[in-house]
Image (tube, rainbow, N blue to C red):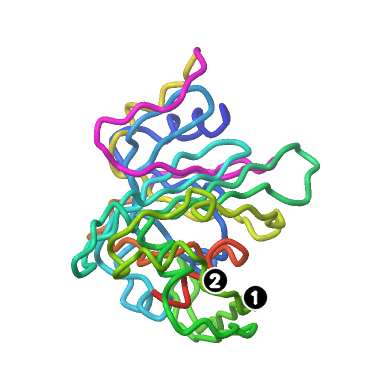
Amino acid sequence: MRAIYMSLLASGATASITTSFWFPVNLVGTDRITYVASVIGAASDRITLAAHPTNDPDYEALGIDTTGTLTLTVASTLFEQSVPEMTGIAGGNPKDFGQSYRCEVPSADATAAACTGSVGQGIARLQHCATPRSARQAETVTKEWTFSDPGTQGVETIVRTFPPSPTTPVPDWCSAISDLTGGSVPSSVLTTTAEVPVSEFTTFTFILTAGEEKLVPATTAGAPTSSTPVPTGSAPNSGRTGTSSSTAGTGAAAPMKTVAPALAALGAAVAGFL
C-alpha cells in the first residue's frame, strides 16, 4: 500500500490522478467501469474515497443510475462497503433499508475471502415476510453494453449467474408485522456469511480529482478519518499494487444503483424483491 501512496504522490497535486484498486467484479458484472473519486481520508494502510462511476450512458444496461453515493476504503486485504440508508421507500424509514457487506482475505495465499452481509430491518422483512415464497431457480442474466476504454471500444457481453434459493416457511415473527415498513425483526436474520473466491475480485480504474493532499503515508495505525458522514468500504489487494498516472479531469459522475449486494451468496434473496 505504501507503493500506492508514493506513486499517487509522484503524479503531482495539480492534475487528476489515475490509479487502480481492488473491487468485486460481481457488484457490476464487469471490470471496465471507471470511477471518479475524491480522497476523504487516509490512515495506516487505508485510503477512504468518495467515488462515482463516470457518466457513461451505456452504464444503464448494468443497473447504474445517477443517484446515490458510493464510498470505499481501500486496504490491502479488505473490501467493505455500506449504504446506510435508501430513499424512495413509501412509508418506510430509509435507514431500515440500509445494507453493508464486508469481505476480508485471511492470508496472502488464501483462495477465498470471508464475507459478511448485513441488511436493515426493512430489507429483512422483504426477504422473510413478503410473498410469494416459492423457490427461486438458479438464474443467468446476459446483457450487452457498449464500452469505451482509452484506445479501444466495442461491445461486451455481461453474464451474471445467481444461485437458487429454496422455499422456506414464513417465520412466526412475520405475523406481528402489519406491513413491510414496521415491526421488529430478530437480529439473527440481519446477517449472512459466505466465502467468495478471490478470483471474483479484480482491479478497477479510479480517477482521483480531489483530496490528493491527504495521501500522506501514515505513521500510526488506525481507521481512516472522514470529514463527511458517508458510508465506508474497502477492497482486498492480495498482492497487487495500484498504478497511477496524471490525467485531465473528467466531467460529472453517476453512482451505482446497487441496492442489494450482488455478491451471489449474500444478496440473491434481496435482489429478487428490489
Residue found 49% across the figure and 51% down from its top: 118
The residue type indicated by label 2 comes to Ala
Q: Which mark is residue 221?
A: none
Q: Nearer the viewer, residue 51 or 211?
A: 51
Q: Nearer the viewer, residue 106 or 97?
A: 97
Q: Label 2, on which residue?
A: 268
Say whether residue 237 is magenta.
Answer: yes
Q: Nearer the viewer, residue 208 or 96?
A: 96
Give the mark nearer the N terminus: 2 vs 1: 1
Residue found 66% across the figure and 55% down from its top: 194
Please provide percent x and percent y for residue 49: 38, 41
Q: Label 1, on which residue?
A: 163
Check whether the beta carbons of the residues at disc 2 and disc 1 lie within 8 A of each other. Answer: yes
- Is 264 located above or below residue 107 in the figure? below
Say whether residue 74 is magenta.
Answer: no
- Main secondary structure of the magenta stretch: loop
Please provide percent x and percent y for residue 76: 60, 36
Give the position of the N terminus as an image quadrant: top right
* Residue stretch in magenta: 220-247
Give the position of the C terminus as an image quadrant: bottom left
Please provide percent x and percent y for residue 39: 34, 37
Residue 16 visible somewhere in the drawing: no
Q: Is residue 196 left or right of residue 245?
A: right
